[in-house]
Image: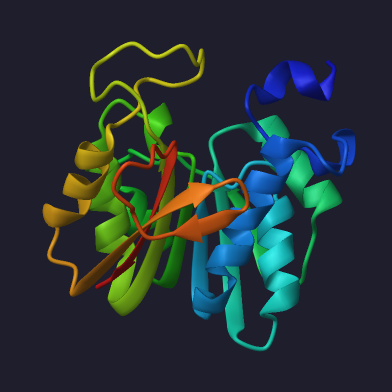
């Protein structure tokens, strides 16, 4: 099967033009998260593994272990083949499985990029992330904006897309000690500004 047939929205840098806008935006999220990478790290819904490999190479001294989790067997096989690193372990898992924290343990940093819009029970997903994050640990999470929870989206692989207000409300429900909200514009990130329409939100949460 052609790799593009089973990846859906998955980013495959080796099959994309270097200046592809979607590729650049995805890479920018990992660059944004790089300073927070330390200790034991989880990349939930890691896809093809390019981001895991990128941050592992850049933060190899600060990194103890990086666990990349995805639900698709072929995607994980590709990640193991193309983006192997001595500090990375790829494994299969369901992001909304209530037993996931018991399976994976605790992490100093958790990355979740463009994942929450793919799951119907986003609160269970957030509960899993919060339970897996160590006290003092950092969660870096992004999601595109849309019509809101339970509303149809034009993206075939998205269950729904949260509004900016719903996105920010996700983090109010959990007792994080600090939450910083940024919005992505192209490859840059900024604090919200009045009168500017944003399409992707990024949250940095400290437990």
**In the displayed structure image, the side of residue 138 where residue 18 appears, left or right:** right
Q: How many marks?
A: 0
Left or right of 141: which side holds 70? right
Query: Where 113 sits versus 8, above or below?
Result: below
Q: Quadrant of the C terminus?
A: bottom left
Would you say residue 171 is visible in this rendering?
Answer: yes
- Could you tell me if residue 106 is visible in this image? no
Q: Nearer the viewer, residue 33 or 10?
A: 33
Above or below 148: residue 129 = below
Front one among 14 and 88? 14
Q: Vertical placement of 92 versus 53: above or below? A: above
Give percent across and percent down for residue 99: 30, 47
Q: Quick one: quadrant of the N terminus?
A: top right
Q: Quadrant of residue 165?
A: top left
Q: Give residue 205's position: percent from left, percent from top.
A: 31, 66
Residue that appears at 28% across and 51% down: 128
On the picture, is 29 further left or further right than 130?
A: right
> Percent from the top left, x then y, of residue 75?
69, 35
Which residue is depicted at the point 12% across and 65% down?
175
Q: Residue 90's spot in the image, x, y percent? A: 64, 53
Q: State the image quarter where residue 152 is shown.
A: top left
Q: Residue at x 35, y 27 (%)?
A: 161
Determine the residue positioned at 53% across, 47% down.
185
């Amino acid at each position: 099967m052609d790799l593009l047939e089973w990846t859906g929205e998955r980013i495959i840098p080796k099959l994309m033009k270097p200046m592809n806008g979607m590729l650049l935006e995805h890479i920018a999220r990992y660059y944004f998260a790089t300073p927070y990478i330390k200790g034991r790290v989880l990349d939930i819904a890691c896809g093809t593994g390019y981001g895991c490999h990128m941050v592992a190479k850049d933060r190899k001294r600060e990194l103890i272990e990086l666990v990349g989790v995805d639900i698709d067997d072929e995607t994980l096989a590709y990640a193991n083949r193309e983006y192997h690193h001595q500090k990375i372990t790829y494994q299969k898992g369901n992001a909304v499985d209530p037993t996931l924290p018991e399976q994976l343990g605790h992490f100093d940093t958790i990355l979740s990029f463009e994942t929450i819009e793919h799951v119907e029970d986003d609160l269970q997903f957030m509960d899993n992330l919060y339970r897996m994050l160590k006290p003092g640990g950092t969660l870096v999470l992004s999601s595109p904006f849309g019509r809101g929870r339970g509303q149809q989206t034009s993206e075939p692989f998205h269950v729904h897309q949260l509004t900016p207000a719903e996105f920010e409300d996700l983090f109010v429900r959990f007792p994080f000690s600090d939450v910083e909200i940024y919005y992505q514009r192209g490859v840059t990130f900024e604090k919200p500004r009045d009168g500017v329409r944003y399409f992707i939100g990024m949250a940095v949460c400290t437990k």
